[in-house]
Amino acid sequence: MVHPIVQGLATGIGLMTGKYMLGATNFVEHYAEEFHATDEQKNFVKAAMYCGAVVGMIGIGPASDIVGRRKGLLACSFITLIGALLSAFAWHENLLIGARIITGIGMGGEYPLASSHSAESSKNTADGAKNVALLYLFGSGCGQALCPLVTYFMDVAGVPADRLWRWIFGVGAILSFFGLILRYYATKDSAKFTQARAVERTSRMSTVSILAPYWRALMGTAGCWLLFDVAEYGLKQNDAAIFSAEENRPFSDSVLTVFFTRLLVIPSLIFAPWFLKQVSSKRVQLIGFLGCLLANVVLAIGTDGLKREVLLFDALYIVQLSFQSLPGVTTMAISAEIFPSAVRGTGAGISAASGKIGATIGSYVFSELKNKHEISAIFWSVVCTMLLATFLTLVAIPLYNGHTIDLADSLACEGRVTEAVKMLYSGPKTEEGKDATDDLPDKEEDTSDKTVTATGDFQPESAVAVV
């Protein structure tokens, strides 16, 4: 039997590789001088991976509801490997753009698959958000920090620029290959997913008929993820240039600054799993959006003055990145929890695809603003998106706990989808289906050997392994 830590590593390594490959374009444009790419081509190189990600999310995510999570995860690793190899050996900027699209397809499938698989494999339904947060810590935290670290060491080691950028992608190819082998031996479909698929085949309900009543929830998860990714990826694809915009210092110093900002955000990612055990996912998301909004207001107002105070500017930037980590976790976790198990890959896939549409917009628009040296306008754009995301969270994201999810999922499995949606928006529940006294996630009870019925009763089922 595979150890749970190895299973968790197998689930999260694809997301880590995707985040690493996303970060690569933050530096490659500086080193790939032989391409003589125009600003527009550089912007397309950055946006290309997001375009591919949308295809992967709306394609591989729903497909995993049919073929299974394991096969979907293997496909993602293989596609990412091909894209990384093509990127490393690209001899023209247009070929690099195509290779980045392929890489994006593999990365895109990771978001709905890894998050859904992690949530479904939780022993206790209430631990779903916490486990997705741990997945995000490993994938986003480690992946985003690894890329600038690898780049910095190769730069100071004197690796020629025409080889350095290719090796950045080469490391991504090595990670993809390792992930492919690990997933082949260490992953399997969860019992919860297998049972949900069996019920769906018996009921003969289509994916559309199950998902359609969840339109409000889908609007909330997709819209919030889109707005969040406009800000997150728009900033992270350009922050190396933001840090060096008004300073005469080597580019390697800016790379090191990016590394430290990523590294110093990891404590907030470690904090997120614990926080999600104490406070509902909806409220965690609101705290993250509002904190990010306030930090960017300060950055937008004081950009010129703060840039002269390097440590203060970097500190404020790290503060807003730390607040970003909260909705970074919740946009993924909520999408992986609130939809019925039989269509969870589709719901999470549509939400994630919406996010990458936002990432494409943010990456391209923020790059244009960066090229025009409108750094303050970048931060004001973040303020606007965070304000809209806060409003959408308030009106469209449900307030729930683990028992709410169990009850809603059971109703959906019985074909009572409209009632399932009402249950989802009825607030936190107790084990018996009554209104809970607070909205805190369930902390103590382990429902690994139980399944809840629509009336709140529990029936035994096979245990599910932790991932």
Image: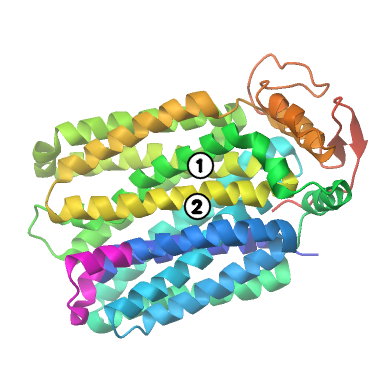
Few, some or many residues within 10 Å of mark 2 (<14, 14–19, 20+): many
Q: Amino acid at mark 1?
A: Ala
Q: Amino acid at mark 2?
A: Ala
Name the image quarter holding the N terminus.
Answer: bottom right
Observer able to see residue 444: no
Residue 213, x across and y down, in percent? 67, 34
Would you say residue 175 sits in the magenta stretch? no
- Residue farthest toward the top in the current orientation of the protein: 437
Few, some or many residues within 10 Å of mark 1 (<14, 14–19, 20+): many
Does residue 163 lie above or below 385 as drawn? below
Of 213 and 67, nearer the camera is 213
The residue stretch that appears in magenta: 29-46
SS class of the residue under badge 2? Answer: helix
For the point 48% across and 29% down, which residue is it? 393
Q: Main secondary structure of the magenta part?
A: helix
For the point 55% across and 77% down, which residue is it? 177
Observer able to see residue 355: yes
**How did the renderer colour the structure?**
rainbow
Per the rendering, the mark at residue 353 is: 2
Does residue 10 lie above or below 261 as drawn? below
Residue 440, x across and y down, in percent? 63, 24
Indicate which disc, 1 or 2, sits on the residue closer to the N terminus.
1
Does residue 152 lie above or below 217 as drawn? below
Per the rendering, the mark at residue 427 is: none
Of 380 and 204, nearer the camera is 204
